Image: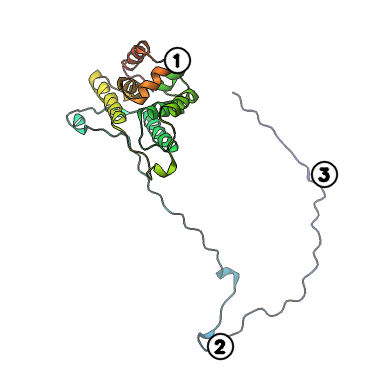
Amino acid sequence: MAAHTISLSTHASQFNCRRPKLSSPPPSQNLSPKSSHSPWLGHTNPSLQSSHLRTPRPKHRSINATVTLSLPTANPERFSTTEKVPKWSAKALRAYGFARLEAMKMWDTDTRTCYLVTGILLDGTSLGAKFLLANGITISKLREEILKAIGRRELREVPIGFPPLDTSTQRVLDWAADEKLKSGESGEITTAHILAGVWSEKESVGHKILATLGFNEEKAKELNALISIPCVED
């Protein structure tokens, strides 16, 4: 798109910009401080020259942030013998972060598999999100079913901090990593891998909610075909 430059010109003659006359201040008195004597402080002679008065600049606190490029696993040994360790895509990492925040927002005691699906949809642009939206599964429908399934906890029941992963959620992350390793293909572990992992956990709340929203084995086959494409981008 071509950039259009608009030239704006102003003529000084169009404006009456005369500076108003200010009345001269009264004769200043001698404001230089005199030496004063205090029985506690002794002789003092403070200097009030403006060149010596400087407003201190606020000090900014430095913040140290750690960015992780992997997700928790219950079996880290799987990567010790692997030369090329698959990495999680940026959108998969973001979906995981959204899932933790959603669990905390719901005042839940655990980060469940349904929150992984929520995290995928909250991004909206990933491979997994596009697959869900194409099959009519939206964030509003998902949240409605989550409320029906587990409800909302009382705030006093919730521990401080992010709710820990439950065992099903941890198995989903391990399943996604294992599937990528078994494929032998390069590329990243995507949100589609996470979504397929949720469906693989048959007894999880995430699987049951997906089934309620119309996800079935036929759609799971389409999803598995999608993640089997070499170097598919999230």
Residue at 37% across / 24% down in the picture?
206
Of the two numbered discs 2 and 3 on the same chain, state the one appearing first in sequence.
Answer: 3
Residue highlighted by disc 2: 37
Label 1, secondary structure: give it: loop
Residue at 82% across / 44% down in the picture?
14
The answer to whether the residues at label 3 and label 1 have Cβ atoms under 8 Å apart is no
Label 2, secondary structure: give it: strand
Q: Amino acid at mark 3?
A: Gln
Q: Amino acid at mark 2?
A: His
> Badge 2, how many Cα within 10 Å: few under 14, some, many 20+?
few
Q: Which mark is residue 93?
A: none
> For the C terminus, which image quadrant?
top left
Which of 42 and 53 lies nearest the eye of the viewer?
42
Residue 91 seen in the current view = no
Of the two numbered discs 3 and 1 on the same chain, state the one appearing first in sequence.
Answer: 3
Q: Is residue 131 left or right of residue 72?
A: right
Which of 231 and 148 lies nearest the eye of the viewer?
148
Q: Nearer the viewer, mark 3 or mark 1?
A: 1
> Badge 1, how many Cα within 10 Å: few under 14, some, many 20+?
few
Residue highlighted by disc 1: 135
Q: Which mark is residue 14?
A: 3
